[in-house]
Image (cartoon, helix red, strand yellow):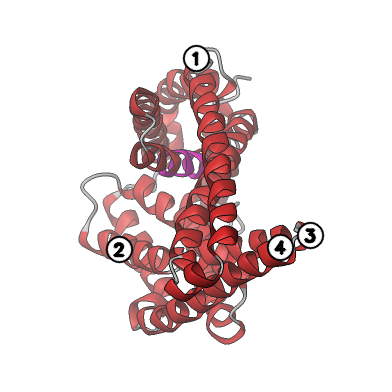
Amino acid sequence: MAVSRSVVVALRRRAEADASSSQGGAQPQDLLQARLRRCVALLPRVFAEDDPEAVHDLRVWSRRAQEVVVTLFGKPLPPEARTTVRVLRRARRSLGVCRDCDVLIELLGRKARRIRNQAEKRAWEMIREYALSRRERQMRRVMRKLANRKLFTLGQRARQLTEQAAQRGDLQPAALITKLVTSVRSGYTEWREALSRACQSFAPGEIHAFRIRTKRLRYRIELVRDLGDGGAEAALTSLRLLQEGLGQWHDHSQLGKLAAEALADPRFLQEQPQVAGLVLRKLARDHALQGERIRRLLTDARESAEGSALNNWVNRFCAETAPQANASSPALID
């Protein structure tokens, strides 16, 4: 059996199970509701516990839920789906600074423990305290932004969305397969285009845009995997490794900006000019090293794209799944 055919078979079996029993397996609408409920369930931990892991998880699950919405409803999104995406995006972006600070606070803590020069150690500790203060200020803003009714009613919105989709016939297995193929194909095309632009200039803005495209493509393929395509895991493995490298570049880029802001204190510069210079020189060397690493990472990704596990899986999935769905559609819908 072809790898991509497993999604068609899984959806068909679930459709047949749903016709004879209420105990069918998970379908895209089930995944959407589960992921939106997961976002809502994380909110108390973000509000009450100020948990860095909860902040990270809410951002990840909001993106996963968003990609299900985009896949299920396509473009242009209907009003209710557009509102849901807007709520998820705003929550994720409002937590972005907090997440960056959490990562940098941990990174700076490790760095300070390794330093033996006491003056330099104090400089890194000062930068860490600046990050802690910045996170505290940002969390106060986040609390105000997240404390809105739309975010806490995502579960209800999921039911409304799936009811609307069912009425239009968008949840029929054949229609879902078409949507999955369209979502993966467009996501992969946009990913390749973003990779090409990043490799042309290696500009931070283009690299960041490629990083976002990598996340979006990963979560779209995760949806296909969760619907029954075990072969998607090979494609996901390469995307995770790429995302890890891009994440390290992002973290060090943010560290440089944060340190520059913290060291710009006039009193510190006047009292400790040599220490400030030492830290800035280390940051410059690290920046150059990260620049070389990201160039190699992006160049390797572009040069190996055609023969990669990701490219092979996307081509196979798009070439094989759509014809199988069309051939099976009468049986799937009956």
Residue drawn at (75%, 60%) of the image: 117
The reply to whether callout 4 and callout 2 are in contact (CB within 8 Å) is no
The quarter holding residue 184 reads top left
Q: Are marks 1 and 3 in contact (CB under 8 Å)?
A: no
**Alpha-carbon neighbours of circle 3 within 10 Å: few (<14), some, or many (≥20)?**
few
Q: Does dot 1 land on a helix, a strand or a loop?
A: helix
Amino acid type, label 4: Ala
Q: Earlier in the sequence, mark 2 or mark 3?
A: 2
Is there CB contact under 8 Å for labels 1 and 4? no
Please say whether residue 213 is one of the residues in the magenta stretch.
Answer: yes
Q: Which residues are magenta?
A: 212-220
Q: Residue 285 in the image: x percent, y percent?
A: 57, 40
Q: Amino acid at mark 3?
A: Arg
> Whole-percent x and y of residue 17?
58, 48
Point out which mark residue 116 bears.
3
Residue 63 in the figure: left or right of residue 131:
left
Front residue of this view, candidates 79 and 108: 108
Real-space Cα distance between discs 1 and 3? 42 Å
Q: Is residue 314 above or below residue 169?
A: above
The percent position of residue 101, horizontal first and vertical second, equals 53, 66
Give the alpha-carbon distance from disc 2 to disc 3, as whole Å.
Answer: 48 Å
Instruction: Using the rendered image of the protein, determine whether residue 13 is visible from the camera's viewpoint.
Output: no
Measure the C-alpha gap from mark 4 to mark 3. Answer: 9 Å
Q: Which residue is mark 2?
A: 86
Q: Which residue is mark 1?
A: 303
Front residue (pair 8, 295): 295
- Residue 123 is left or right of residue 267, and the answer is right
Front tag of 1 and 3: 3
In the depicted structure, whether residue 95 falls above or below residue 50:
above
Secondary structure, mark 3, is: loop
